[in-house]
Image: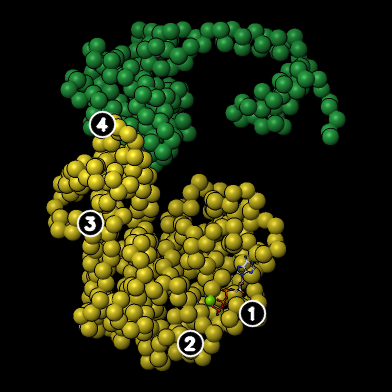
């Protein structure tokens, strides 16, 4: 059984519609119910700030401080984490640019929010992800990269660096007569970073596929088959240095074409994650709304299981409006699977009775107007 | 309109001091006040030292370092192993490596890194000088000690390419240098370890 990472204290200051909130949690799952607009998703978003990035809404930090307050926001938690108990504080000062989010661990400022990954991993599923299969491929890449990132903290830096090298190359290609040696230097960087990045994605997809497969007959959720496509699809059996060479060649021979297109046409930034409903043998985007949701839930649960298995620590799971589309039997099955993951989950809904099947496995909180009712 | 407290000479002194890294407008004012109070003990000697430095400071035509002589103190130091050159982005990196005292080598200061997005190209850097220096012979090893950023690594690739065909061993800092961690900010132990464990390109 993986170690259960759990929040025991949560304090919010000027966070969305919370002026101030101080909450003690007992380590069980947390069910948040309340009316529309009460602040359930906001509370989940606060927890999602315990991972690097802009949280489950991908918010601009300037939007997060409570309207009418003049400073920044802060989220403070006490956590039984992957390295033992830790106090985590994160937020912005407000005022200036509002680009960077600050992080304090046990009261000491640390340089990057990436250090959060040493203490916990957060995995979430929100209604805004419902269109994942039908939306643009960029959404699926981002989804995939988030999954990779929770297992491989280096992934974010590699992806950002790849992007930077690629933009540099695009810029050079737009010059009248670009220095070929300089282009090569950038392309070598792109090959190194891009293949490492794509490799990490392939690895995740294959690990995840294994887990989806293992959970196949476990409850009423359909299983997904996953495949990456759009970038060097047939080469991934080769050793990394060979694939790097192949990609470098592609870049070098594609210079004219890319210069004309004004962008780089080959690379991990063009890959897509193809998902199929296995039992029905159908592309996910052609499945019904409920089937798509069920596929997504299956994926997220498999991923959470993967993180638990790889790190030995069950991730914190945020499931926003998870019960909404499911019938009673599927709900009960979902709760059992969530519980079996061994971590602390946060779930929301408008109606408490939807969570009855959780029984005393969860702590029930009523959210109302930016506060928790006693 | 705020009333003036000082004449334009002191005002100008404050304005200039505020441009010194580490000094904000507030500390610049404190420093200026301190200087003018110690007119003879500090302000005068400082002005002389600055004038002298200004007259003499130049960029070393061999390695790109700043010093008051050309070639610089490092380049003329006979106790150094001049067959080994450490290539750095900035003079501050040279100083950091010297502080760590790990190597008894010569240096080459590039004056930046290749960055198409910032409009910095090969001609803006001291790369030609490096190639000439190596081509003259007598250089056994080149340690490329640039930062682990995209720009740093692109520059490393570029330099390696420009030196291909020349008889010199090229190595780079071992991993363990934090990503994007500027050498200047690393502690001496980390720097020494990264230099000792350098790997061939
Ligand atoms: N920066 C902010 N300052 C103040 N209020 C905000 C801020 N950002 C969002 N809100 C408000 O917070 C309220 C609660 O939002 P939240 O999304 O948490 O509701 P919810 O409980 O999840 O509701 P639903 O059941 O409809 O999903 C909304 O009315 C929203 O307008
Ligand atoms: Mg909501
Ligand atoms: Zn010199």
SS under mark 2: helix
Front in this rendered view, residue A193 or B170: A193
Q: Which mark is residue A231?
A: 3
Ligand 2 neighbours mark 3 (CB distance < 8 Å): no
The answer for how far apart the CA atoms under marks 2 and 1 are is 18 Å
Tell me what hue chain B is rendered in.
green
Which image quarter: residue B15?
Answer: top right
Provide residue A215's location: percent of width, then percent of height: 26, 78
- Chain hosting mark 2: A
| Comes first in the chain, label 2 or label 1 | 2
Which of marks 3 and 4 precedes in the sequence?
Answer: 4
User: Can you say whether B139 is above or below B90 in the image?
Assistant: above
2 and 3 marks in contact (CB < 8 Å): no
The chain identifier of the residue carrying mark 3 reads A
Q: Name the secondary structure under disc 1.
A: loop
Marks 1 & 3 on one chain: yes
């Amino acid at each position: 059984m993986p170690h259960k990472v759990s929040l025991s204290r949560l304090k919010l200051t000027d966070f969305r519609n919370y002026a101030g909130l101080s909450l003690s949690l007992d380590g069980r799952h947390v069910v948040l119910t309340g009316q529309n607009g009460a602040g359930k998703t906001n509370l989940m978003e606060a927890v999602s700030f315990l991972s690097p990035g802009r949280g489950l809404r991908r918010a601009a930090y300037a939007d997060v401080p409570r309207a009418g307050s003049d400073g920044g926001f802060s989220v403070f938690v006490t956590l039984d984490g992957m390295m033992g108990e830790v106090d985590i504080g994160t937020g912005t000062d407000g005022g200036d640019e509002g680009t960077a989010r600050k992080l304090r661990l046990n009261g000491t400022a640390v340089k990057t929010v990436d250090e959060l990954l040493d203490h916990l991993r957060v995995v979430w599923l929100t209604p805004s992800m419902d269109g994942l299969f039908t939306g643009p491929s960029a959404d699926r890449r981002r989804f995939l990269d988030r999954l990779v990132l929770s297992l491989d903290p280096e992934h974010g830096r590699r992806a950002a660096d790849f992007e930077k090298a690629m933009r540099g190359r695009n810029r050079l290609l737009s010059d009248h007569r670009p220095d070929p040696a300089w282009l090569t230097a950038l392309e070598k960087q792109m090959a190194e970073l891009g293949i490492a990045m794509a490799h990490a994605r392939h690895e995740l997809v294959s690990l995840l596929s294994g887990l989806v497969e293992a959970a196949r007959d476990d409850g009423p959720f359909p299983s997904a088959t996953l495949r990456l496509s759009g970038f060097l699809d047939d080469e991934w059996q080769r050793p990394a240095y060979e694939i790097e060479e192949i990609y470098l060649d592609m870049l070098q021979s594609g210079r004219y074409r890319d210069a004309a297109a004004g962008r780089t046409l080959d690379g991990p930034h063009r890959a897509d994650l193809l998902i199929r409903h296995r039992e029905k043998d159908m592309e996910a985007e052609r499945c019904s709304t409920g089937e798509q949701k069920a596929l997504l839930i299956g994926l997220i649960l498999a991923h959470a299981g993967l993180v638990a298995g790889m790190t030995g620590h069950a991730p914190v799971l945020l499931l926003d409006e998870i019960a909404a589309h499911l019938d009673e039997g599927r709900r009960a099955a979902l709760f059992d699977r969530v519980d079996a993951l061994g971590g602390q989950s946060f779930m929301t809904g408008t109606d408490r009775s939807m969570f009855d099947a959780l029984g005393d496995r969860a702590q029930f909180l009523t959210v109302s107007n930016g506060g928790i009712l006693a | 309109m705020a009333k003036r407290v000082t004449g334009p000479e002191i005002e100008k002194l404050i304005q200039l001091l505020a441009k010194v890294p580490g000094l904000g407008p507030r500390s610049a004012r404190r420093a200026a006040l301190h200087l003018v109070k110690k007119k003879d003990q500090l302000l005068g000697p400082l002005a002389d030292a600055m004038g002298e430095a200004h007259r003499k400071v130049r960029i070393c035509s061999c390695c790109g370092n700043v010093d008051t002589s050309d070639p610089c103190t490092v380049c003329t130091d006979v106790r150094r192993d001049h067959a080994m050159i450490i290539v750095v982005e900035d003079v501050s990196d040279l100083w950091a490596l010297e502080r760590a005292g790990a190597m008894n080598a010569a240096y080459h200061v590039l004056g930046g890194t290749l960055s198409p997005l910032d409009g910095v190209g090969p001609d803006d850097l001291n790369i030609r000088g490096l190639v000439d220096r190596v081509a003259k012979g007598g250089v056994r090893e080149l340690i490329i000690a640039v930062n682990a950023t995209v720009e740093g690594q692109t520059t490393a690739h570029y330099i390696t390419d420009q030196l291909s065909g020349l008889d010199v061993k090229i190595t780079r800092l071992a991993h363990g240098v934090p990503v994007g961690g500027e050498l200047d900010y690393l502690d001496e132990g980390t720097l020494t370890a990264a230099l000792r464990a350098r790997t061939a390109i």
